[in-house]
Amino acid sequence: MNSNKPRRKAHHLQATDLRGIAQLGSQATAGIARIVEGVHQSIWARLGMPGGPAPGQTRGVTGMAYRSVHGVNRLVGASLQALLKRLEPMLQSGSEGTEQQESTQRAALLAALNGVMGDHLLATGNPLATTMSMRWKGLALNWQALPPDFKPNGKVLLLIHGLCMNDLQWQASDKGRTVDHGQALAAALGYTPIYLRYNSGLHTSQNGRELAAQLELVTRHWPVPLEEISIVAHSMGGLLTRSACHIAGQQSLSWLPLLKNIIFLGTPHHGAPLERAGNWIDVLLGSTSYTAPLAKLGQLRSAGITDLRHGHVRDEDWQGDDRFHRLPDQRLITPLPAGINCFAVAATMSAKTAKRGGALANRLIGDGLVPLHSALGEHSDPRRDLGFAKSEQLVCYRMNHMELLSSPVVCQQLLNWLHTTPQKQTKQ
């Protein structure tokens, strides 16, 4: 790669975005038409009128009207897709020989979209679907053509974002100054920080499997001898990390023995009540014939979001289940990886009290998204308790979920842990 090549100015919109947006628009039109027809038919059914050939469909002239809407929508959508695909080379003209840099606004919007419906984007081949990548300075690392200014050492620090977020959002703001835990740890402890970007709408175990494969590529292509890997994972990123470690152990992957530390920031190890509340909305909307068609709106939630209900990390935790049905916690027991220093940072919006478990905010809401006991891996069933030692825990009071990324207190604790901890010995 030529070091003199100019870096392309960051843009809010890229050529393939138009095709992805058009595809979503066509699918939204079809979805709304199906919902409206379902409500229409539910009213007719209450009056004793028969329905169409499939549940939720109308018949006669009304059914013909809805079929016409769907037919026109498919025709217009397909034509628009074909046209935009032909225009993409012209929209990309002038980008040859340059690195395309996206704006932080575009990255944030795509991350949120993928978090909410990333599984749907991937299944429908939408170009807006995010592909997992290891990133440095905002760009994906190409192991065959690394940036000329990429000068790594043997200590890797991987930072993994949470649901609906992206790698650029590790640069957070605290009282007007930028905080980046990765850069702080790199400066103080000599790590080379790299950042993961992934489609957070996929099942956590799907992303965990891909993360395990990506880390295998890191060990294979790292430019200098690799001595150590440490991971800092925020929220859902911690579930991905545990999933990847489980898979690496099963497959005897070469990166797992190099993994020394994992720090979990606000990870919902045992689930998040807000997703369970969302599941209740599905149940309530589906309880009457009039509102049942509207339950489809609640089912826009991605596989990644519904995995947060109980904190799934393995394929077996969700396979064979209807993820929109209210089910008890049926996860398989998945302990923390053996022989690795594991730390948990939890936050609560309540003030510090003498009895930590007594405040409602701690027990139910915690940091606004993750309850305190879930972030600390605590469980009433001893088999499910992750067993973080008190010295491996930090509880931050009057702090919400997102402030974990910008807190100087959290940053200092990360420095302390990574500076002083020796490699754990695997228990025999």
Image: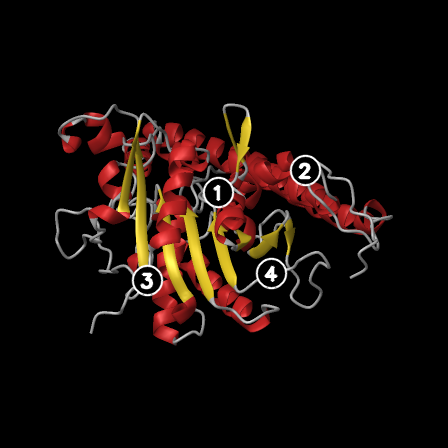
Q: Distance between the residues labelled 4 and 1?
A: 18 Å
- Which residue corresponds to mark 2? 103
Residue at x 64% of width, y 48% of height: 137
Q: How far apart are marks 1 and 2 (CA)?
A: 21 Å
The earlier-in-sequence mark between 1 and 3 is 1
Q: Which mark is residue 152?
A: 4
- Which residue corresponds to mark 3? 340
Asked which secondary structure carries label 3, the reply is loop
Residue 145 coordinates in the image, percent (x, y): 71, 65
Circle nearer the viewer, 3 or 4: 4
On screen, 27 above or below 425? above
Q: How far apart are marks 3 and 4 (CA)?
A: 23 Å
Q: Distance between the residues labelled 4 and 2?
A: 26 Å
Q: What residue type is labelled 3?
A: Ile
Q: Residue 181 carries which label?
A: 1
Residue at x 38% of width, y 76% of height: 252
Residue 45 coordinates in the image, percent (x, y): 35, 32
Mark 1: give few (<14), some (14-19) or many (20+) Cα within 10 Å. many
The earlier-in-sequence mark between 3 and 4 is 4
Mark 3: give few (<14), some (14-19) or many (20+) Cα within 10 Å. many
Left or right for 274, reference 56: left
The earlier-in-sequence mark between 4 and 2 is 2
Left or right for 313, reference 109: left
The earlier-in-sequence mark between 2 and 3 is 2
The earlier-in-sequence mark between 4 and 1 is 4
Residue 347 coordinates in the image, percent (x, y): 31, 34
Mark 2: give few (<14), some (14-19) or many (20+) Cα within 10 Å. some
Q: Distance between the residues labelled 1 and 3?
A: 20 Å
Quarter placement of the N terminus: bottom right
Left or right for 161, reference 67: left
